[in-house]
Each structure stands twice: as C-alpha cells, then as structure tokens.
Amino acid sequence: MDTTVNLIFTGEDLSALSADTVYRRLISAIDFDDYQWQRKHKVTFKGRRLAEGAELVLYKCPKCNAEITLRSEGNKLFCLSCGNEALMNSKLFFEPGTTDSIVYDGFDNWYDFQQESLLSEIHDPNFSITATTSLLWNEPGKYGYQVMGHGKLSLTREAVIFEGKVF
C-alpha cells in the first residue's frame, strides 16, 4: 500500500471558501490514476484468471471494431468476431496474444479508444442505435412493473422512437 497525506483545508479555508471551490479542491486532491501508478511501480499480481470479467468494461475490439464480441477466459481476452487476442500479464497489462493481434496495453488506454470511437459515432449525422425491448409500466397500486408491450427502441440524433405493440 502506498499512502500520501496532505493538508487540503484549514478551518479558516473552509469558512472562507465557496462550496464550489471546496468541492473542486477536494476532487482534485483525491484524483488518482491506478494505471499510471502501476506503470511506474510495476507490482506483480498472481492469478490464473487475471483477464476474467474484462469484457464487462471493454466492449469494442480494436482490430475489427466489433462491439459486444469480447469474451474472457483465464488470462485471455478474445474477440468472437475476428479472433483478436489479448493476454493479461502479471503486471495487469495486456499483450498481443498472436503476432497479428491488436490490443491496448491497459484498461485505461482501451477505454479511451472506446470513448473516442463512441464520440465519433455520436457526431455522425446518421447516428442511430437500436435494440429490441419490452415496454414496462409501474401501474399505481400494483407491485413492480407490468409489461405493456414489446418492440424496438431507436435512438437517433433527433429522437427516441419506440416501434412495436402496446397491450
């Protein structure tokens, strides 16, 4: 464990500063980047399943750009669409699983890739995302949600659209 203690405020500071300034200073003081720290300290982790669950955060393949096709097993993250492979090493960084694999070294850089891709997609004038869904309603006096219908929900730059059957 690595700990640093710093004085952020004095009693006088808290009396004199605005709530917004206190909030910003506090957020700045507790900001921490685990991956930057790990890149510097290179702590070793032991385990046979270090990559398992990575697909809960990483959803886009950097090789074929397929989404929701990543799966993990043991220390391996792989794409069902193109076979791209990332192996998580004992320092919790990804390495290519094959000579033609394309991977980002850490969750942070892979996540940044996903965010940049998503922003690019959203700014496209033809942006649309569609999913099959159930329409639920919380009817007053009844417990839980009742199914009102099924259909397709679409999100575009202009609208949220439900197409389907109700009741």
Image (cartoon, rainbow, N blue to C red):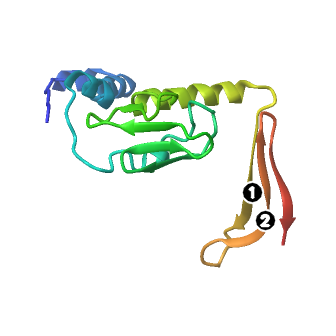
Q: Residue at x 79, y 55 (%)?
A: 152
Between 40 and 90, the residue placed more toward the observer is 90
Going from the N terminus, do you reach mark 1 or mark 2 first? 1
Residues marked 1 and 2 touching at CB (< 8 Å)? yes
Figure quadrant of residue 104? top left
**Can you say whether 4 is above or below 148 in the image?**
above
Q: Residue at x 35, y 28 (%)?
A: 23
Question: Looking at the picture, which amino acid does disc 2 mark?
Answer: His
Q: Which residue is mark 1?
A: 132
Quadrant that contains the C terminus: bottom right
Point out which mark residue 59 bears: none
Q: Which residue is mark 2?
A: 150
From the top left corner, tell me how far across and down residue 121 is, in percent.
Answer: 69, 29
From the top left corner, tell me how far across and down residue 63 is, in percent.
Answer: 58, 30
Question: Looking at the picture, which amino acid does disc 1 mark?
Answer: Thr
Q: Residue at x 63, y 33 (%)?
A: 65
Rounded to the nearest angstrom, the CA distance separating label 1 from label 2 is 8 Å
Q: Secondary structure at mark 2?
A: strand
